[in-house]
Image (cartoon, helix red, strand yellow):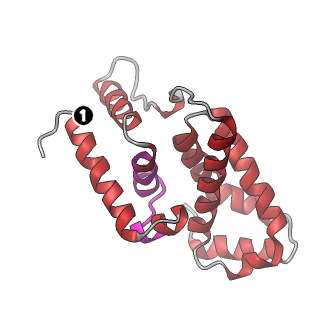
Amino acid sequence: MIDEGVLAGAMAALARGEKAAMAVIYDAVGRDLYGLALWRTQSAEDAADVVQEVFLKLAQTGVALEDIARPKAYLLGMAHRAAVDVLRMRRRTAPLDDALLLDGGAGSGEALAAREASAAVAQLAPEQREVVYLRHFCGLSFSEIGKALGISLFTAASRHRLALTRLRKLMGVPS
């Protein structure tokens, strides 16, 4: 995991026209951007398009990149907006990608639990699923999630709380 300082440095280098910084940025957040887009769009093809769109816009942004305080949250926000745009444009629903199903080995108890958890997460509202992903897989705070998604800190925390309550119910875990 790359720290925000290195990512901010790469963003500043890109703002100065150093195109090699794009590789550093991709290595730092490419996986998180793809994961967020995959959770949002539920399509591997659409998620790849979203990541490509984010990096295209990033290359075109230029000097404004130097002033970004939280580059990871900024980039995840770009991915969120691009994913929403893809969904609006395509107006279709794809089945949840099998890549989201975690596998602990064929027939193992871990694999069954992972599949059950993945199926439960798939039943969450997209807004809740997105907050769960950003919180637990990207490690963002509720404040950063709020900035990335354009919602308040309290809305982010509320969506997370509601998602966990629903997951407990779906998985038969007492509250």
Residue 89 against residue 151 in the figure, above or below: above
Please give left or right for residue 30 compared with residue 117 in the image: right
Residue at 76% over, 56% down:
55
Q: Quadrant of residue 110?
A: top left
Q: Quadrant of residue 74?
A: bottom right
In the image, is residue 135 part of the stretch drawn in magenta?
yes
Q: In x, y percent, where is residue 45? A: 68, 33
Element marked by disc 1:
helix
- Residue toward you, 133 or 139: 133
Please give left or right for residue 91 compared with residue 40 in the image: right
Residue at 47% over, 64% down:
145
- Residue toward you, 92 or 118: 92
- Residue toward you, 154 or 134: 154
Name the residue at the left extreme: 174
Q: Which residue is mark 1?
A: 170
Residue 107 against residue 85 in the figure, above or below: above
Please give left or right for residue 157 compared with residue 93 in the image: left
Residue 75 against residue 45 in the figure, above or below: below
Please give left or right for residue 122 compared with residue 169 in the image: right
Residue 67 against residue 32 in the figure, above or below: below
Q: Which residues are magenta?
A: 128-144
Residue at 73% over, 80% down:
66
Q: In x, y percent, where is residue 135? A: 41, 57
Q: Which residue type carries mark 1?
A: Leu
Looking at the magenta stretch, what is its main secondary structure?
helix
Q: In x, y percent, where is residue 152? A: 43, 69
Name the residue at the bottom extreme: 67
Q: In x, y percent, where is residue 20? A: 83, 63
